[in-house]
Amino acid sequence: MIKINENYLKLQASYLFAEIKNRTTAFQQAHPDRDIIKLGIGDVTRPLPAACIEAFHRAVDEMAADATFRGYGPEQGYAFLREKIAAQDYQARGADIAADEIFISDGAKCDNGNIQEIFSTDITIAIPDPVYPVYVDTNVMAGRTGRFDQGRYEKIVYLDGTRENGFIPDLPPEKVDLIYLCFPNNPTGATISKKKLKQWVDFARQNKSLILFDAAYESFIRDDALPRSIYEIEGAREVAVEFRSFSKTAGFTGTRCAFTVVPKACTAYSADGEKQSLHALWYRRQSTKFNGVSYPVQRAAEAAYSPQGKTQTNEFIDYYLKNAALIRREMSALGFDCIGGENSPYIWVDGRTDSWKFFDRLLENTGVVCTPGAGFGRCGEGYIRISAFNDFENVQAAMTRIRETLGS
């Protein structure tokens, strides 16, 4: 008799986005003539930037010739991409990150889930609420939580994000070992100042904590006063790991390329209190379980850093920010309190009612799919998240439908 990992049984019945898909599919089957506009899951709709496509084609052609064919690549990623990332994403902004501290991967979601493997199961974790579900669910799977009760798991220190604190949680009231942060935030779209982020870094340094900083949406920041990396904060190299992605930056959701930064100065501790290099541990994990991102994909990602690529990706991001501005403007005009939509592709809307009821109302009356805030945690109840990832014409049509339905 083979036994399962019973921590999986603690997971709630359905992953949030799977439930959205199921409800949307059921509605579509019941109303085959209705046009659905999806502003729920954050998947891009624009094609890859031309510079990336051209590099992709060149790399595929290389794979067709004996002299330029490549088999297994380095698990950490090719140096040509890591060097571009280090120079342009970090060193250009005064962040002391070297190419050999960067690990190329097939997705920030994967890395966020996988990295918890290298930590003990008896550590204390602090997770914001509302939050991207992967942070919670992967720790449930690993056995770091107790049972689910009244919307929360036992043994997790929840960091409440509310209207009062602008959905930027306060520091934990107690010492914790592992802290998850995401800015610009998914789902709320909130951004954090350098001053507030420094408070988190200082807390981690004082308490020997580690911050897992998800910066997947940093390229949407247009306010130069806001940090785009936690490594812009003094001391962060010792206490933070950062995750980034090309999915929203350059439209790689279907192409799969991301990276994680693990500075060599970043440490954790063994049971006897001896310092351990997280860089070395993550390298060991990746070299054991991961064979790297394909060469053509990494060449395509590298092209995003070329002069043409940077122009095209900025246009790509501006397109979605235009959508976000329209959504926020229209929802605000209808009297809803909103945050996000500025420096972020997500708009967090106070629906003033049960989240799933609001989701169903929009779906049934307008054919527009959003994301119910309750799916992101107890503090998300009453809110919905609207994504700016769609064609501008569809966003216009969605806002017209919502205005005609909710404004009457």
Image (cartoon, helix red, strand yellow):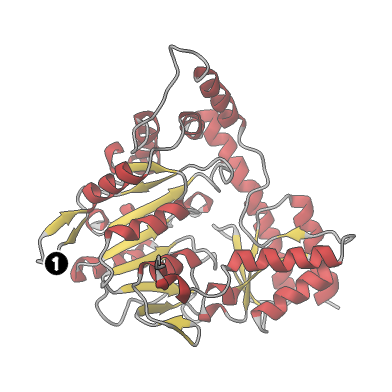
Looking at this view, name the residue that lies furthest to the right. Answer: 33
Task: Identify which residue is drawn at 84% across, 74% down.
Answer: 405
Q: Position of residue 193 (x, y in %)?
A: 41, 63
Q: Position of residue 60 (x, y in %)?
A: 54, 23
Query: Which residue is identified by label 1?
Result: 271
Q: Left or right of 179: which side holds 336?
A: right
From this view, report whether residue 94 is shown above or below residue 339: above
Q: Quadrant of residue 385?
A: bottom right
From this view, report whether residue 152 is shown above or below residue 260: below
Q: Position of residue 266 (x, y in %)?
A: 22, 54
From this view, report whether residue 357 is shown above or below residue 250: below
- Closer-to-camera residue (386/29): 29
Q: Quadrant of residue 372?
A: bottom right
Q: Left or right of 114: which side holds 28?
A: right
For label 1, count other residues whose C-alpha is less than 10 Å away and answer few (under 14), some (14-19) or many (20+): few
Q: Secondary structure at mark 1?
A: loop
Task: Identify which residue is drawn at 41% across, 72% down.
Answer: 7
Looking at this view, name the residue that lies furthest to the bottom. Answer: 150
Q: Left or right of 276: which side holds 4?
A: right
Q: Quadrant of the C terminus?
A: bottom right
Looking at this view, name the residue that lies furthest to the front. Answer: 1
- Closer-to-camera residue (165/134): 134
Q: Quadrant of the N terminus?
A: bottom left
- Closer-to-camera residue (121/208): 121
Q: Could you tell me if residue 18 is visible in this image?
A: yes
Task: Identify which residue is drawn at 65% across, 57% down.
Answer: 388
Count the numbered circles shown: 1
Q: Could you tell me if residue 163 is visible in this image?
A: no
Task: Identify which residue is drawn at 36% across, 78% down.
Answer: 156
- Identified by mark 1, the residue type is Ala
Q: Position of residue 403 (x, y in %)?
A: 81, 70
